[in-house]
């Protein structure tokens, strides 16, 4: 674990924090964990500079550093920094199928949409592209599990794949959740379908019509939200 990197990031987040912004950010996110109040652009600069100055030498140390920053966080901004480290371009070679367990822990323990969506729509998608058989099996399993955030992740893990979307996987991850009552799961279904509609509106319209009685009104509304705009 690169403890020097962790200390530097924590120190700079503390130094650049804005208490007034912190209060608003905490209220917006309904967060039990406080914020330093560092917004996205300066936070990412803090991270980029720290990553460049204090590189990590191997994948085990990278995972340990990400999880150290994540697990020991006292402020939500620190967890955002952990997500930045997990997705840093310089560590792309370390993001192998073996790193899925790290992302799973972050999704389950984070248990809120800001963390989950950043990880699922970027990191899980990346792993799916690199390791399609193994990731497809795991996402199908996640779509049935007790944890709603893993279910949401399985549904949105193909966002922005466009024409490369694995439709069989998408349907298989949506179907076990059609009757799910949670807002974030229903929203995820609509979001995934709405994203696909930009590339294949007829398929989405056919799916919504065929599953009209099973899809929640929220999912249907979100799925077809941009239909008129797409048709031009």
Image: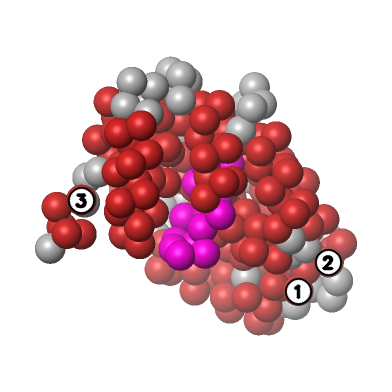
> Marks 2 and 3, Cα distance to the nearest angstrom?
43 Å
Q: Which residue is mark 1?
A: 93
- Residue 50 showing in the rendered view: no
Q: Which residue is mark 3?
A: 227
Judging depth in this view, the residue of 109 and 214 nearest the camera is 214
Of labels 2 and 3, the one closer to you: 3
Quadrant containing the C terminus is bottom left
Drawn side of residue 128 relative to residue 227, left or right = right
Quadrant containing the N terminus is bottom right
> Marks 2 and 1, Cα distance to the nearest angstrom?
8 Å
Residue drawn at x 30%, y 51% is 202
146 up-or-down from 123: above or below? above
Labels 2 and 1: the sequence-earlier one: 2
Q: Residues within 10 Å of mark 3 (few under 14, many from 20)?
A: some
How far across and down, in percent of the image, does residue 195 sit?
37, 53
Q: Which mark is residue 59?
A: 2
- Residue 141 showing in the rendered view: yes
Drawn side of residue 193 relative to residue 114, left or right = left
Labels 1 and 3: the sequence-earlier one: 1
The reply to whether the C-beta atoms of the residues labelled 2 and 1 are less than 8 Å apart is yes
Q: Residues within 10 Å of mark 1 (few under 14, many from 20)?
A: few
> Marks 1 and 3, Cα distance to the nearest angstrom?
38 Å
Judging depth in this view, the residue of 69 and 91 nearest the camera is 91
Residue segment shown in magenta: 152-166
Residue drawn at x 57%, y 46% is 168
Magenta-colored stretch includes residue 158 = yes
Judging depth in this view, the residue of 219 and 9 nearest the camera is 219
Magenta-colored stretch includes residue 44 = no
């Amino acid at each position: 674990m690169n403890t020097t990197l962790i200390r530097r990031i924590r120190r700079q987040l503390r130094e650049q924090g804005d208490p007034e912004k912190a209060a608003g950010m905490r209220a917006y996110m309904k967060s039990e964990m406080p914020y330093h109040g560092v917004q996205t652009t300066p936070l990412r600069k803090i991270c980029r500079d720290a990553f460049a100055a204090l590189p990590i030498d191997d994948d085990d140390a990278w995972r340990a550093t990400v999880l150290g920053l994540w697990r020991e966080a006292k402020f939500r901004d620190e967890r955002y920094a952990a997500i930045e480290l997990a997705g840093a371009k310089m560590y792309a070679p370390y993001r192998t199928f073996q790193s899925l367990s790290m992302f799973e822990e972050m999704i389950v323990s984070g248990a809120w949409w800001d963390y989950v969506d950043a990880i699922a729509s970027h990191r899980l998608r990346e792993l799916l592209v690199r390791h399609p058989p193994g990731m497809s099996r795991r996402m199908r399993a996640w779509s049935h599990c007790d944890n709603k955030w893993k279910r949401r992740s399985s549904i949105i893990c193909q966002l922005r794949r466009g024409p490369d979307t694995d439709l069989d996987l998408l349907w298989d991850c949506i179907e076990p959740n059609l009757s799910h009552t949670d807002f974030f799961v229903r929203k995820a279904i609509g979001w995934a379908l709405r994203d696909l509609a930009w590339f294949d509106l007829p398929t989405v319209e056919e799916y919504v019509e065929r599953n009209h009685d099973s899809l929640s009104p929220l999912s249907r509304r979100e799925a077809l939200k941009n239909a008129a705009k797409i048709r031009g």
